[in-house]
Image: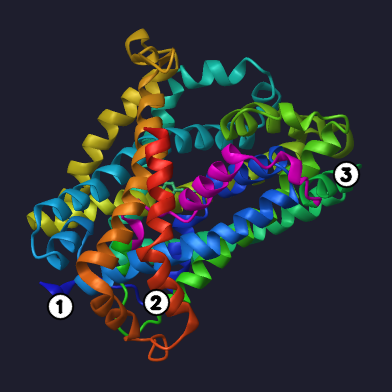
Amino acid sequence: MAGSREQFGSKIGFILAAAGSAVGIGNLVGFPVGAAKNGGGAFLLMYAIFVVAICLPVMIAEMSVGRASQKDPLGAYTNLSKSNPLWRFAGWLSVITPFMIAVFYLVITVWIFGYLFESLIGNLDELAKPETFGGFVSGNSLFVYMIGVLLVVYAILQGGVKQGIEKAAKILMPALFAMLVLLVIFVLFQDNAMAGVKFYLVPDFDKINAGVVNGALSQAFFSLSLGMGIMITYGSYINKKADLPESAKLVALTDTAVAFTAGLMILPAIFSFNPEVNTNELSESSISMIFSYLPQIFLELQSSIGYVGSSIVASLFFLLVFFAAITSLVSIFEVPVSSLMSEKGVSRKSSLFICGALLVVFALMCAFSFGFFEFFTSFINYAGADKSFFDVVYDVFYDTILPLNGLLICMFVSYRWKKLGFNAELEQGAPNYKTSLLAKYVNFSLGTFIPGILALIFINTV
Ligand code: PHE
């Protein structure tokens, strides 16, 4: 069946799709908030080093495993390890993890879609009230929004790789860049904006400690969509002539540039809203930032640009985040969908319906974690606290399994598939790769300190 595998139509299409996966809520909100709380420029510097030194080699490894095997993650591990059971287990993890992350990511995307809709119809004053979010996440309108998001995802994925994923990325990503730049320019013209820029960029090395270092690395890893089987799957859709190391560099660069630019939007906005802001107390999470803090800032704008103006700004912001979230959601859901297609030989449509039905069941359990049902809200008790079903999925898959998957792919490429096959795959499309400094670095790091660091993170969270 290898010959009939779907493919991206162009190099730029592949890069936009992979960048679409990488650019998500993490970039637009998680990164700026993380940078603000953890030493500004010092955090940025550390983050940039992690992207280049640790994440880039892992991304190259994932893409090459996908392209060499021309399979989904389970098929790729099975194929290249000649059906070794241990590596098949790694393959299973690379399919289950994205599915479970898709579950909680879907729920957050649904909230964003709801907020987008509410700001479009002029309900910004409602959204800015502190109690609104709590009511929203446990209200029935959520189900309507969920259907909306699922329809968008279905509309994209039923078109397949070229007519679905690639086409959507080619429309959504340029729109996303344009909206981001527009919002940054707007925000920079607000009073006191420069204080925010300064706070974002001036390094404070005293804030750096072990926890911050770990957080920066996890953020970079998640932001580049690593450890989720996505780059393996997308890699399996590129032709052999494409230069993989080059593509990986462009994806990493785009992702980091968007994250950096988002900081120029979020921090000046915060400072112009409240010049006295105590950045240590900046919202605990991206979630409270998006759904509580920012709507207040948007509403505040009405004194200068009127209610309609501030509603437009809010709508633009939520549309930006929605586009970022949709391209990520599509990429992560494609992993189980493509796995079921190639492992069981079912059609794309059937796979979408089967995986989609499962996704809805789990997503509802996550959505019920916010006050619908006590059972899901206080699902289990560990680490001294009641955890909801949503928390459990997040802690297990995002915090714990993600670094494990990263560790496994490094070990797989270095010690099972081995450098010979790995490098031969990369040389197709990049004839000079073998003798490059990058190749030496990638080969060395993937077999030594990168899996070491990922193992430390994994053990630490367990
Ligand atoms: N890279 C995404 C982000 O920064 C993370 C992600 C990718 C989440 C794909 C889900 C699916 O938000």
Tell me if I can see residue 40 in this picture: yes
Q: Residue at x 44, y 53 (%)?
A: 327
Q: Main secondary structure of the magenta part?
A: helix
Q: CA distance from mark 2 to mark 1?
A: 20 Å
- Camera-side residue: 214 or 34? 214
Residue that mark 1 sits on: 3
Location of the C terminus by quadrant is top left
- Crowd class of label 1 (few under 14; some 14 to 19; many from 20; radius 10 Å): few
Taking the view exactly as shown, the residue that stands out farthest to the top is: 374
- Camera-side residue: 431 or 22? 431
Q: Amino acid at mark 3?
A: Ala
Asked whether, in this view, residue 377 is left or right of residue 38, the answer is left
Q: CA distance from mark 2 to mark 3?
A: 41 Å
- Measured from the top left, where is residue 34 in percent x and y? 64, 41
Disc ID at residue 244: 2
- Crowd class of label 3 (few under 14; some 14 to 19; many from 20; radius 10 Å): some
- Measured from the top left, where is residue 186 in percent x and y? 80, 51
Tell me if I can see residue 162 in this picture: no
- Residue 214 on the magenta span: yes
Identify the image quadrant of residue 191. top right
Number of the front mark, 3 or 1: 3
Q: CA distance from mark 3 to mark 1?
A: 56 Å
**Marks 1 and 2: in contact by CB < 8 Å?**
no
Magenta segment range? Answer: 202-231
- Crowd class of label 2 (few under 14; some 14 to 19; many from 20; radius 10 Å): many
Disc ID at residue 30: none
Query: Considering only order in the chain, which callout, 1 or 3, is on the residue closer to the N terminus?
Result: 1
Location of the N terminus by quadrant is bottom left
Residue that mark 3 sits on: 195
